[in-house]
C-alpha cells in the first residue's frame, strides 16, 4: 500500500471516529455519561472536564449521578451543565448532582434520527473528499513519473475499495444509532 493510501485510510479512520464521538453526545433517552464529554466546569479559574472533577455513574437507566471529589466544585459543575446544550436541569442535593433524562417523544426521536443521518451523510462526504485527494495525489505521482500507469490504476482502485469500506462502516454506525434512538 502506498503512502497516499495509508494517509487516506488514517484520515478516513479519524472521520469515522469523529462521527462516533458525535453520536455519543446525542441523547437517546437513556443515561449515558458520554453526554458530559464536552462539558467543562470552571474549577479554580481553569475549564476542567466534569469527568476530571467527579465520579459519574449510572444508577438507573435514565439517571446520571455526578459526585464531585471536591464538594466546592459542586456549584461550578451545576452551572456548567445548565449552560451546556444537553438540555437537562441538574438536581443538586448538596453532595451529588442528579441528571434525570426525560423519556423522548416520538417527534423528538424522529428529529434525532434525522440529525444522525445528516451527520452520517457529512462523514460520507468527508470520506469521498479524502478519496478525491488521494486520487489527485496518485495522478500527480504518475505524471511526475514516480509510479507507472498500472500502479496508478491499482492505487485508484484501492482508494475506491477503501472508500467503499468506510462508507459501509458509516452506514452501520448510522443504523446502530438510529436503532438505539428509536428503541423505546
Image (cartoon, grey):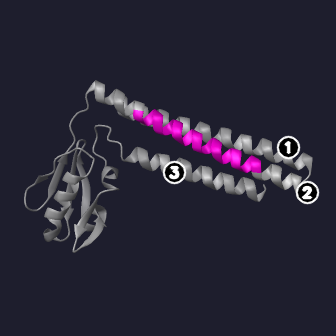
| Magenta span contains residue 121 | yes
**For this rendering, which residue is in front, 116 or 129?**
129
Task: Point out residue 57 in the picture as x, y percentages from the top left corner.
Answer: 25, 55
The image quadrant where one finds the C terminus is: top left
Q: Is residue 183 visible?
A: no
Q: Earlier in the sequence, mark 1 or mark 3?
A: 3
Answer whether residue 137 is visible to the viewer in this image.
yes
**Which is nearer the N-term, disc 1 or disc 2?**
2
Q: Is residue 133 left or right of residue 49?
A: right
Give the CA separation, mark 1 to mark 3.
29 Å
Task: Label 1, secondary structure: give it.
Answer: helix
Q: Quadrant of residue 81?
A: bottom left
Q: Name the residue beneath numbered marker 1.
A: 153
Which residue shows up at 26% across the image and 32% down it? 104
Q: Position of residue 96 (x, y in %)?
A: 14, 59
Q: Position of residue 120 (x, y in %)?
A: 50, 38
Q: Nearer the viewer, mark 2 or mark 3?
A: 2
Amino acid at each position: 500500500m502506498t503512502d497516499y493510501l495509508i494517509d487516506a485510510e488514517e484520515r478516513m479512520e479519524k472521520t469515522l471516529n469523529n462521527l462516533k464521538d458525535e453520536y455519543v453526545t446525542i441523547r437517546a433517552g437513556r443515561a449515558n455519561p458520554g453526554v458530559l464529554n464536552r462539558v467543562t466546569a470552571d474549577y479554580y479559574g481553569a475549564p476542567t472536564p466534569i469527568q476530571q472533577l467527579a465520579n459519574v455513574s449510572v444508577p438507573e437507566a435514565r439517571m446520571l449521578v455526578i459526585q464531585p471529589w471536591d464538594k466546592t466544585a459542586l456549584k461550578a459543575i451545576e452551572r456548567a451543565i445548565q449552560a451546556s446544550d444537553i438540555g437537562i436541569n441538574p438536581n443538586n442535593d448538596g453532595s451529588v448532582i442528579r441528571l434525570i433524562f426525560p423519556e423522548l417523544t416520538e417527534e423528538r426521536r424522529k428529529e434525532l434520527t434525522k440529525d444522525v443521518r445528516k451527520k452520517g451523510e457529512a462523514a460520507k462526504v468527508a470520506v469521498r473528499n479524502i478519496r478525491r485527494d488521494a486520487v489527485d495525489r496518485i495522478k500527480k505521482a504518475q505524471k511526475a513519473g514516480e509510479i507507472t500507469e498500472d500502479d496508478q490504476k491499482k492505487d485508484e482502485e484501492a482508494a475506491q475499495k477503501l472508500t467503499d469500506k468506510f462508507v459501509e462502516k458509516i452506514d452501520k454506525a448510522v443504523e446502530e444509532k438510529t436503532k438505539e434512538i428509536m428503541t423505546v
